[in-house]
Image: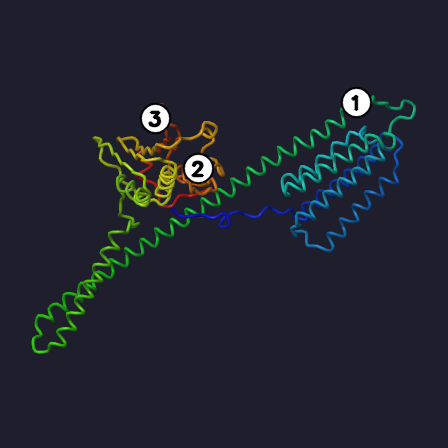
Amino acid sequence: MTDISASDFRQPRRHVRLDTILRLRWLAALGQLAAIFVVVQGLEYDVAIIPCVTIIGLSATLNLVLQTLFNPVHRLEPLFAAALLALNIIELAGLLYCTGGLQNPFSFLFLAPVLISATALPTRFTIALGILAAASATVLAFFHLPLPWDSAEPLVLPQIYLLGVWFSILTAIGVTSLYAFQVTEEARKLSDALAATELVLTREQHLTQIDGLAAAAAHELGTPLSTIFLISRELEKNIHNNPELADDLKTVREQAQRCREILSKITQLNSSGAPFDRMPLSQLIEEAVAPHRDFGIAIKIRIAVANAPEPAGMRNPAILYGVGNILENAVDFAREQVEVNAWWNAESIVISISDDGPGIPPDLLKRIGEPYLSRRRPAEEGEHRGLGLGVFIARTLLERTGARVTFSNRVFPDHGAVVQISWPRDAFETADQLADVD
């Protein structure tokens, strides 16, 4: 099957746009000013207004400078994005210092920069920002100005409560950041895997198109070559007085015959993609099995003859690649043989591929088919370590054609994996040559 390298499709880690961070910083600055206005004018509490406004003013000034110097759509390198997020944490810590420290309910905003980093920046920067946020929260637990409150009835919170707030902030930073990172990483993996699937399908379609062009060329060239062959043979019969010309005509005839034989081989090897060409199920299985016969593993094919006629569909690159990739995995893990069983009736078509290898580990059985899930034989046995994309690509392409793919193990005392691919007969026989990948 077609080899796919990680560099062919893996997308670079997404960089945060400057405009995204600036919007968040402007939103934070406006929210902070609004909060100070409500506390001072609405609640009439004493607040260290000058330090707070100074911090917000410096933040707004930096925003203006960045907007002036850089294009808003500029994508920041991870280091600079992390630096801006770290500055957000420091600015928030400064405001919280002036307004009660961890007693201020806005102290949970320490989570925001760390969460942004977990979804968009490398892990090392997220860890560094998490440590900075935790250190800031720890310092604010001991050093801060009084919380703005009614001077007649000052609020005094017990130390155990403040310890709980501190611990909850640290826990929230760790748990939510880890969760956000895992969800985002899974989304990235799925995106890369689908990109690989599209690449595989595109390559298979190109091979099919080349195959069709070869068939068309063989068909178009066959007629003039036959004419040349016939004319040269007739001329050769009628020329007796000129041996040299007769030899030349014989050479022309032989070369024309040779060209006809080459085109005949191309036609035989071709799996035509012409609209009127149909591929029976047995031919599909044979074409998928053929590349894997010379690897020291016996491949046995059993096709059950049913009352219904043998199903035939268009030559579909998605089906060929999917079945071939599953066969390749079976050959990789088999010890002595692989069995390919097929049967059909008027409603459905089933292909079952099984091997006599170790089988699918129980912890992977329910997750098989996910991208980047791989467990190969030990490296000393000569097996390469794949990207874990093969089964995902095969399953995705087959399901796009209407197939249902299931994975299981043989029943004890037999051992090995079993992959069953089933189609509704109508879906198989009418499957489009092009399989769309979402």
Image quadrant where residue 291 sits? top left
- Give SS at disc 3: loop
Look at discs 1 and 2 and give the one toward the viewer.
Answer: 2
Callout 3: 10 Å neighbours few (<14), some, many (20+)? few
Q: Is residue 107 left or right of residue 324?
A: right
Image quadrant where residue 119 sits? top right
Which amino acid, by three-letter code, is at mark 2?
Answer: Arg
Can you name the residue that lies furthest to the bottom here?
A: 241
- Residue 429, given in percent of the width and then of the height, sits at 30, 39
Which amino acid, by three-letter code, is at mark 1?
Answer: Tyr
Callout 1: 10 Å neighbours few (<14), some, many (20+)? few
Q: Residue at x 20, y 65 (%)?
A: 256
Q: Residue at x 54, y 47 (%)?
A: 11
Callout 2: 10 Å neighbours few (<14), some, many (20+)? some
Image quadrant where residue 404 sits? top left
Disc nearer the start of the sequence (1/2): 1
Where is 428 relative to 229, above or below? above
- In the rendered image, which residue does mark 2 sit on? 377
Task: Report the disc number at residue 414.
Answer: 3
Structural distance between the alpha carbons of marks 1 and 2 = 54 Å
